[in-house]
Image (tube, rainbow, N blue to C red):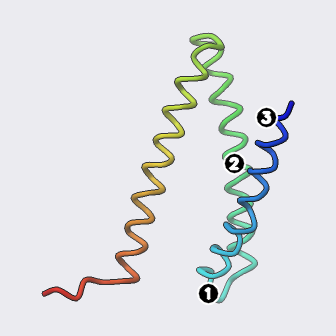
Amino acid sequence: MLLVFLLGLLAFAIIPGMQTRVLTAAGAAPTLAIAVNASGFQLAAAFAGWLGGRIVDGAGPRALYPAGAALTLAGLAVAFVLLRRDTTARYPSTVD
């Protein structure tokens, strides 16, 4: 029960920082940016339920652990690539 509480606490602690980042990058359409960000969360939750059901149906409940680990690693890889792209766009190389 404690782990469920901590998961919820950490999940909701991330949202204000993400919303701030979206607002900073939004430019002239902050409301639209926040709406798209929230829609992305809802779409991801729906996709996770669908994919989890497909995995359990096809390979059984024990397959959820490696599938979750693989998807987490894939998400981290995408995040690192996007972070690298963002910082190189902001700070171009001064070496010619």
The percent coordinates of residue 22 (x first, y second) are 64, 73
Cα separation between marks 1 and 2: 24 Å
Up the image or down, 62 lies above or below 11; here it is above
Determine which residue is flagged by label 1.
Answer: 27
Residue 68 marker: none
Is residue 23 found left or right of 83 in the rendered image?
A: right
Task: Locate residue 93 relative to residue 15 in the image: left or right.
Answer: left
Name the residue beneath numbered marker 3: 3
Q: Outermost residue, front direction?
A: 2
Camera-near label (3 vs 2) is 3
> Residue at coordinates 40% horizontally, 82% vertically from top-left?
90
Q: Position of residue 37 (x, y in %)?
A: 68, 64
Of the 4 image quadrants, the one containing the N terminus is: top right
- Tell me which amino acid carries mark 1: Gly
Circle on res. 43: 2
Task: Classify 10 Å Cα crowding around label 1: few (below 14), some (14-19), many (20 and above).
Answer: few
- Of helix, strand and loop, which one carries label 1? loop
Q: Which residue is drawn at 43% across and 57% down?
A: 80
* 51 relative to 3 in the view: left or right: left
Q: Earlier in the sequence, mark 3 or mark 1?
A: 3
Nearest to N terminus: mark 3 or mark 2? 3
